[in-house]
Image (tube, rainbow, N blue to C red):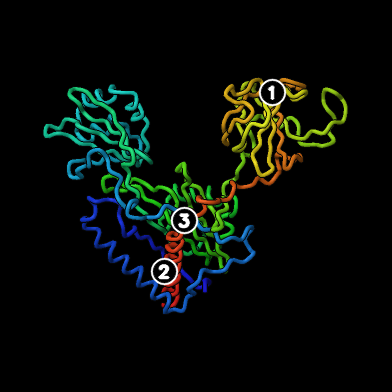
């Protein structure tokens, strides 16, 4: 079925916009027609005799799983635009796009704005200094009064907020619109004809989204090698809008990759802290629970070797970890979430911290120059948190951290041990995960079948 397909890209903004002021926009009728076309395509898919059930997964992938992504549901609450303190009147604003080589002075000249306003703006506050670093393609919203005097400038190219500088008398003040960016769900669906990167770009997937995608699935799949011609892909994601204009792409919400009879699905799920993480349908996290290394090091001065001869004592003594050489004072970080099991002096290891990560995993960090003063036995630590600093206390020939990774109290080579993922979702979190993902998975199914229908139509012409 897939060998005769040709690429047909489908990209349709969601039917439900998250804004009230946009609902009367003339473009809404276009979304309506496109939605009708989408439904008609599904009916066509049924007419072509395409399978109604999701494709089965074979054992061809490194880890064949039907990965479902837990995504925020586009319900009524999420479909509404997060309100700012004062809604913008789109007709009162000018949009300025940064060109290569631009600075704020050039933009002001191009728009006929006064140099005095630029000076006052840049002198108003610390936040305005960020306007000296502009990236081509980013946008500003600028409002002036009837006399051409600058009243307000909003930097819209921010992911979660917009920087707002507004006039008050003869000077400017700063403010931030939190949740001012409107999130609209969208998708890209297509079939690989040449290579995945090339066809994904041709279908409309931005470099920002391609980078995200690689980061999400890169430890499971090689997108270029594993998705050969004939494979299909569907990516659900958010688009960021400001005052009715798209300013960029947001987060990937769900992924569906199909190569012949092999299917790979991922869903994103926001945990209680609001962080977006990606999971399999069974609630298994794709994110490793541990960092590979606890420190930025210059070299590995001694490797894992259970029969090593000690460089100072001259006797055979197991080296149950690795020595990572780094300058004195370099921060040492917890490789995973855990609890301090021991902190203090340990014979040849000098100043040492042992962390218990649960599920039978413990890590040891030795030869520290000093500890994080806030830590004591029983303290909780998070992955990446600084727990101490590189030194050479104890029996050490130079500045380094001695790092051990243990599984059920048995030493494992930290350089090669298979790092587990985050703990699977359980209890209320799992129930909420399952509830939130149902609609997203249904959307993946819909877009996949629509794409199959379009491919079948194209191949039959």
Q: CA distance from mark 3 to mark 1?
A: 46 Å
Nearer to the camera, 337 or 18: 337
Q: Earlier in the sequence, mark 3 or mark 2?
A: 3
Secondary structure beneath disc 3? strand
**Residue at the image position 70 percent from the left and 44 percent from the top:** 417
Please tell me how many numbered marks the rendered image carries: 3
Identify whether 171 is placed above or below 322.
Answer: above
Where, quadrant-wise, is the C terminus in this rendering? bottom left
Q: Is residue 99 visible?
A: no
Is residue 405 rendered to the left or right of residue 144? Answer: right
**Residue at the image position 20 percent from the left and 56 percent from the top:** 24
Nearer to the camera, 91 or 83: 83
In contact (CB < 8 Å): disc 3 and disc 2: no
Mark 2, other Cα within 10 Å: few <14 / some 14–19 / many ≥20: many
User: Disc 1 marks which residue?
Assistant: 344
Foreground disc of the pair 3, 2: 3
Q: Residue 67 is drawn in which quadrant?
A: bottom right
Mark 3, other Cα within 10 Å: few <14 / some 14–19 / many ≥20: many
Q: Residue 391 is drawn in which quadrant?
A: top right
Nearer to the camera, 92 or 375: 375
Q: Which mark is residue 254?
A: 3
Foreground disc of the pair 2, 1: 1
User: Disc 2 marks which residue?
Assistant: 450
Q: Which mark is residue 276?
A: none
């Amino acid at each position: 079925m897939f060998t005769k397909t040709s690429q047909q890209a489908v990209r349709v903004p969601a039917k439900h916009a998250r804004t009230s002021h946009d609902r009367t926009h003339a473009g809404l009728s276009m979304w309506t027609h496109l939605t009708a076309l989408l439904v008609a395509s599904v009916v066509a898919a049924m007419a072509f005799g395409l399978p109604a059930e999701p494709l089965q997964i074979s054992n061809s992938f490194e880890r064949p799983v039907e990965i479902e992504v837990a995504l925020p549901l586009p319900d009524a609450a999420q479909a509404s635009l997060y309100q700012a303190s004062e809604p913008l009147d789109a007709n009162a604003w000018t949009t300025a796009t940064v060109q290569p080589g631009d600075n704020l002075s050039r933009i002001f000249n191009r728009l006929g704005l006064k140099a005095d306003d630029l000076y006052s703006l840049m002198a108003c506050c610390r936040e305005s200094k960020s306007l000296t670093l502009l990236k081509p393609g980013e946008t500003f919203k600028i409002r002036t009064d009837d006399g051409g005097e600058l009243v307000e400038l909003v930097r819209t190219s921010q992911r979660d907020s917009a920087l707002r500088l507004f006039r008050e008398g003869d000077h400017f003040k700063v403010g931030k619109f939190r949740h001012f960016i409107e999130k609209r769900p969208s998708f890209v669906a297509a079939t690989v004809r040449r290579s995945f990167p090339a066809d994904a770009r041709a279908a409309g997937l931005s470099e920002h989204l391609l980078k995200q995608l690689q980061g999400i699935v890169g430890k499971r799949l090689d997108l270029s090698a594993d998705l050969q011609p004939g494979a299909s892909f569907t990516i659900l994601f958010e688009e960021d809008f400001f005052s009715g204009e798209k300013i960029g792409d947001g987060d990937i919400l769900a992924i569906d990759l199909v190569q012949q009879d092999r299917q790979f699905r991922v869903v994103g799920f926001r945990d209680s802290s609001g962080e977006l993480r990606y999971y399999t349908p069974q609630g298994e996290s794709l994110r490793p629970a541990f960092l590979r290394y606890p420190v930025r090091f210059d070299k590995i001065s001694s490797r894992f070797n259970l029969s090593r001869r000690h460089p100072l004592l001259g006797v055979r003594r197991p080296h149950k970890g690795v020595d990572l050489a780094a300058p004195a004072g370099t921060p040492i970080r917890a490789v995973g979430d855990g609890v301090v099991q021991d902190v203090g002096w340990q014979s040849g290891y000098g100043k040492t911290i042992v962390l218990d990560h649960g599920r039978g995993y413990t890590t040891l960090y030795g030869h520290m120059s000093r500890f994080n003063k806030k830590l004591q036995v029983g303290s909780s630590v998070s992955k990446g948190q600084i727990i101490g600093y590189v030194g050479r206390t104890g029996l050490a020939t130079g500045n380094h951290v001695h790092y051990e990774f243990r599984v059920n109290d048995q030493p494992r080579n930290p350089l090669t041990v298979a790092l587990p993922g985050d703990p699977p979702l359980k209890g209320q979190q799992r129930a909420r995960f399952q509830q939130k993902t149902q609609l997203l998975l249904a959307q993946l199914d819909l877009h996949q079948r629509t794409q199959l229908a379009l491919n079948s139509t194209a191949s039959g012409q």
